[in-house]
Image: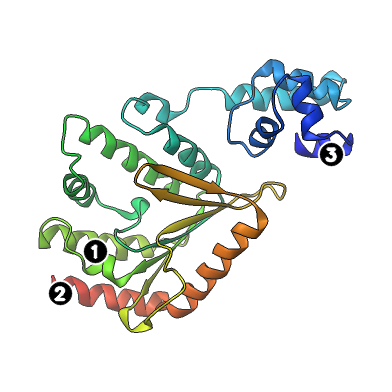
Amino acid sequence: MRRLREAAAITREAAGYEIPSSESKISRLELGRVGFKLRDVEDLLTLYGVVEESHREPFLSMAKAANAPTWWHGYHDVMPSWFAGYIGLEESATLIRSYEVQYIPGLLQTADYMRAVMRGRGMYDADMERRMAIRLERQKVLLRDDAPRLWAVIDEAALRRPVGSPDIMRRQLAFLLEMMDRSNVTVQVLPFQSGAHAAEAGAFTILRFAENDLPDVVYLEHLAGALYLDKRDDVDVYLQVIERISVDALPPALTAEALAKLIKDF
């Protein structure tokens, strides 16, 4: 839709007026942040000069598919509204790069580790198992035929911090080793001896997509919600940081050795 709009030399403001909506709403629509109403797509296609039925149909079909209920829709009552957007991005990404400081990345956690994390956060209630089900379902993205590549750098502190019992930690670290055998999963440990490093801002995730028109998205989670950054200058800062961290971190082979040693330490 963005390509069509730019080809027709129509501003986001003008497109928003047509729906009617705002310039920011058009931006969010083009970035996949909010869903398209079918009527909005029809009106925008007409505005952009796409009037032939054969040319309109692919866009209308995609809009219908995008509005179909997702698997995570059934968990809306136990999932923060600001997180649903992240799952949609994660499902569509071709590359997921993350840096974690405190915990093992969610896509690489065992069920017991998840349960221990939630208990530690005071989330031990009747809905805990359903929240765990969301994370376990998310992990299936790594097992698809068209699975994205996951490249995770984990601070050594997250690996040494006891979460649950020693047995839970041993099994969690063993699961990390198992996942590293997958061709689409790369894990690196950022060791203590690397000293001060570029990730002082904390954990973050960068998502990249197959469509060249879609910008990378940086996801930053905090206690009360999350931020989604897609402006080029902002994304470039985090890309530079993750590159420096990856250079400072142990390569995958040495990471596997470090994990094996940590298992014995627990």
Q: Earlier in the sequence, mark 3 or mark 2?
A: 3
Specify whether residue 145 is in view.
Answer: no
Q: Position of residue 138 (x, y in %)?
A: 39, 42
Amino acid type indicated by mark 2:
Lys
Disc 3 is placed on an element classified as helix
Q: Residues within 10 Å of mark 2 (few under 14, many from 20)?
A: few
Q: Quadrant of the C terminus?
A: bottom left
Dot 3 alpha-carbon crowd within 10 angstroms: few under 14, some 14 to 19, many 20 or more: few
Q: Does the rendering let one see residue 106? A: yes
- In the displayed structure, 2 sits above or below 145; it is above
Mark 3 vs mark 1, CA separation in Å? 50 Å
Residue drawn 76% across and 18% down? 42
Q: Residue at x 37, y 34 (%)?
A: 80
Q: Residue at x 34, y 63 (%)?
A: 101
Identify the amino acid type marked 3: Glu
Judge by depth and name the residue closer to the eye, 49 or 210. Answer: 49
The residue tagged 3 is 6
Q: Do residues under tags 2 and 1 come within 8 Å of each other at their CB atoms? A: no
Query: What is the secondary structure assignment of the residue under circle 1?
Result: helix
- Which residue matches tag 2? 264
Q: Which residue is mark 1?
A: 174
The image position of residue 40, as x and y in percent, is: 71, 20
At x 17%, y 58%, the residue is 163
- Circle nearer the viewer, 3 or 2: 3
Which callout, 2 or 1, points at the residue further toward the start of the chain?
1
| Circle 3/circle 1 CB separation < 8 Å | no
What is the tally of numbered marks visible in this picture? Answer: 3
Q: Is residue 118 left or right of residue 138?
A: left
Vertical arrangement, residue 56 with respect to residue 102, above or below:
above
